[in-house]
Amino acid sequence: MGRLFGTDGVRGVANADLTAELALGLSVAAAHVLAEAGTFEGHRPVAVVGRDPRASGEFLEAAVVAGLASAGVDVLRVGVLPTPAVAYLTGALGADLGVMLSASHNAMPDNGIKFFARGGHKLADELEDRIEQTYRAHASGEPWDRPTGAGVGRVRDYDQGFDNYVAHLIGVLPNRLDGLKVVIDGAHGAAARVSPEAFARAGAEVVTIGTEPDGLNINHECGSTHLAKLRTAVVEHGADLGVAHDGDADRCLAVDAQGNEIDGDQILAVLALAMREADALRKNTVVATVMSNLGFKLAMEREGVQLVQTAVGDRYVLEEMKANGFALGGEQSGHVIVLDHATTGDGTLTGLMLAARVAATGRPLAELAGVMERLPQVLINVRGVDKSRVGTSEELAAAVNAAERELGSTGRVLLRSSGTEPLVRVMVEAADQEQATKVAEHLAEVVRTALG
């Protein structure tokens, strides 16, 4: 049996892979592991639990809350809020644990569980491993040590979470957004209320799409993975920019006034220069992953900003930032971490800061994002293969080496197994689109042959 925890918690098809029993068991295991680690010592433990609007989140939330309370943890249930809101509230309320139920950008049938440690930071790999080991031991019959009487956890709704989080976002903005018109695509997800409210309170004129979640329509042809409707709306409404979130709103992509996509690399480039100007870019360094476009690297070199690259996954970006005191990092997918104001990627905060830069400079977003030129990049997701053999297949290694020789210094290849989905990602950059497409398609076929 493979590891339950991926790069972003535990995910799977709700009520098939991710069942109520699994959610309850992992929650009890998390409570026991953190207690053994001394996190709860000297006080009664408290957890913050939130979710995105997926229908399955309703029963999974009930299972998580039951598991935590049965293990003696008091629960503050904050309802539908973004992942970064749960992380923020975990820290702001002094809670010992945060739990978010979401599968982020995945389709509605999926769901996931993500744990946050005290302070709102993601759990270390070592703690996740211990939680999984503890869960498996008890799932096979080992009895739990269960509190009784007054020792069981108490559960209450924390209705102030929405306003507290929005106030936090407004409080950290460098300037207001008066005079800007912004279209927000909430992906029918966790930011459907939060993001429009925050932009409006910051002074922007707000137009909304994708802000009517019904439990079934999250990420469906909307949000950061489907930008067509946002592009159209920005142009139709004559907006200055558009902002798109994913289901749990820990990421943000943007659209300029002409309807062109502004990806996470471009957003990072704009914010890096803005923060350097404000003397907030510590050590003059930005952190990104190996998936970042080569054009981003070249732009940062030209602008005199140091770039540190990590493995794919915002958790690894965050680990690098925390270890070395960096202030800004993120991914091409739109996960952007501004560590002075958030402990994880925060799509609403990212969108606000990007809009604030447009308002402060008076320059169009397209001009600001023009600091970097995106080199042609092709990404192919190959499903139905054994992703565990990516690093051991000699046939695949030979094909990658041949592709790298062909591309030379004008491009690169990145081939890896997804940490959140059952697939292998093939990414190729080249000097021109035709070459990038040809090489990527060839490697994708080799993946199917070698790992199928």
Image (cartoon, rainbow, N blue to C red):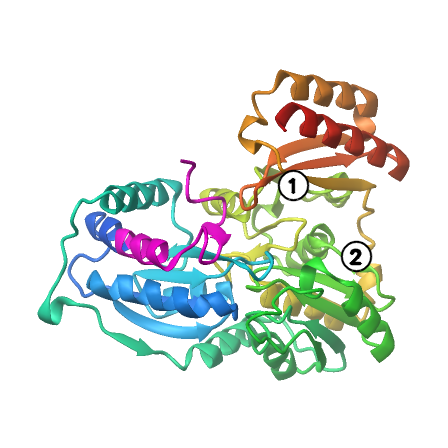
Visible residue check, residue 406? yes
Task: Locate the N terminus by quadrant.
Answer: top left
Q: Residue furthest front?
A: 16
Amino acid type of the residue that numbered disc 1 sits on in the rendered structure? Gln
Name the residue located 30 percent from the left edge and 54 percent from the top edge. 25
Highlighted magenta segment, given as a residue range: 1-30
Q: How many labels sit on residues? A: 2
Which quarter of the rendered picture does the C terminus lie within?
A: top right
Which percent across, then down, holds residue 16?
Answer: 46, 53
381 to 87, vertically: above or below:
above
Give the Cα distance between marks 1 and 2. Answer: 18 Å
- What is the x, y in percent for residue 247? 58, 64
Q: Amino acid at mark 2?
A: Ala
SS at mark 2 in the image: helix
Q: Which residue is denoted by mark 2 in the rendering?
A: 369
Report the disc number at residue 417. none
Q: Is residue 436 above or below residue 89?
A: above
Q: Residue furthest left?
A: 149
Magenta residue check for 53: no
Seen at 36% across and 73% down, the residue is: 77
Q: Around disc 2, counting alpha carbons within 10 Å, would you say few (fewer than 14), some (14 to 19), or many (20 or more)?
A: some
- On the image, the x and y values in percent for residue 308 come to 60, 39
Q: Position of residue 295 (x, y in %)?
A: 78, 42
Residue highlighted by disc 1: 306
Q: Residue at x 79, y 41 (%)?
A: 377
Can residue 301 be seen in the rendering of this structure? no
Magenta stretch encompasses residue 19:
yes
